[in-house]
Image (tube, rainbow, N blue to C red):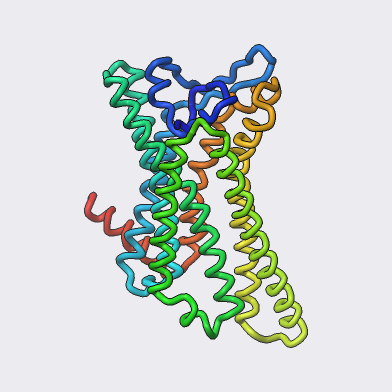
Amino acid sequence: MEMTNRSYHNPSILHVEFSPLSDYMEENDTNSTAGERNSFSCVQVRIPQELFLALGIISLVENILVVLAIFKNRNLHSPMYYFICCLAVSDMLVSVSNVVETICMLLNEHGLLDVHPAMLRHLDNIIDVMICSSVVSSLSFLCTIAADRYITIFYALRYHSIMTTQRAVTIIVVVWLASIISSILFIVYHTDNAVIVCLVTFFCLTLVFNAVLYLHMFLLAHLHSRRIVAFNKSRRQSTSMKGAITLTILLGVFILCWGPFFLHLILILTCPTSPFCNCFFKNFNLFLILIICNSLIDPLIYAYRSQELRKTLQELVLCAWCLGV
């Protein structure tokens, strides 16, 4: 099942494809930045493979730095940062699969790669499982991080007894196992529309879950801000307000980056032959860019806002620069 389809296919079946290597090798469809008009007078924007490669490499480096920083700094060895680390690993799966796929396409484009179709199909399946696992695990860890922030705000005194390291590890193992197993099932039954329904439903549930938690936290932060005005005290209330605004931004970025992709899935179910939907399908590359950009933005939002983590990241970058010199 190839869900990141960079070469357009009939969307009436579930080839909402993550990885188009086999079809790309057959069609040798080279991307360019120029838009082209199709028979329905809609513009199809072509994205250069080099842009996919550049974004994938930057995202990969960012998330590797986050993982290394969390392992290096013992002050970051807590459930919250374990979840951030897992989110970074999820984003790394997208980056690695994107880089490998794009390199194969560029090599084929320049006549430097001649691989047997069966091997390409196996590579397709591996990339599909990686990206599908990343989608499911990313959504799951977004919910986990939101729940962790929620417990931190509403059950601050009991947080360490509720979110123990053992429970955090259990949650992480369950999420990864569920992500891998569901991804394999999605690949095996990719021709069934039920797979799309499951993905869209999971996305919507994730959206509702995060929205409810963020709204509750924002309302609490607003109440605290009113108390600050009335009593002119409590630094903690000010921090809560800042955290609520940050979580609102996180939700907005999440919807912006993933929304078009899941709208694409919904349209496959509702109007696979409509000319309007046809135009929408032909610009799927733009949605892929947004997904990759989400992998770029996640480290900035979740990790770089932490002063402790930011300091460790600066030390890692400085160390790498000194070794390079």
The residue located at (73%, 73%) in the rendering is 222
Among the 4 quarters of the image, the one containing residue 43: top right
Is residue 279 shown to the viewer in this render? no
Q: From the viewer's perspective, is 126 left or right of 157?
A: left
> Could you tell me which quadrant the N terminus lies in?
top left
Q: How many marks?
A: 0
In the image: residue 237, left or right of residue 99: right
Q: Position of residue 12 (x, y in %)?
A: 59, 25
Horizontal and vertical percent position of residue 252: 64, 53
In-front residue for pair 44/26: 26
At horizontal 51% and vertical 30% (from top left) the residue drawn is 191
**Where is 29 relative to 159, above or below?**
above
Q: Is 133 displayed left or right of 120 in the figure?
A: right
Residue at figure coordinates x 33%, y 20% from the top left: 108
Percent of width and height locating residue 217: 66, 70
Q: Is residue 33 above or below residue 168?
A: above
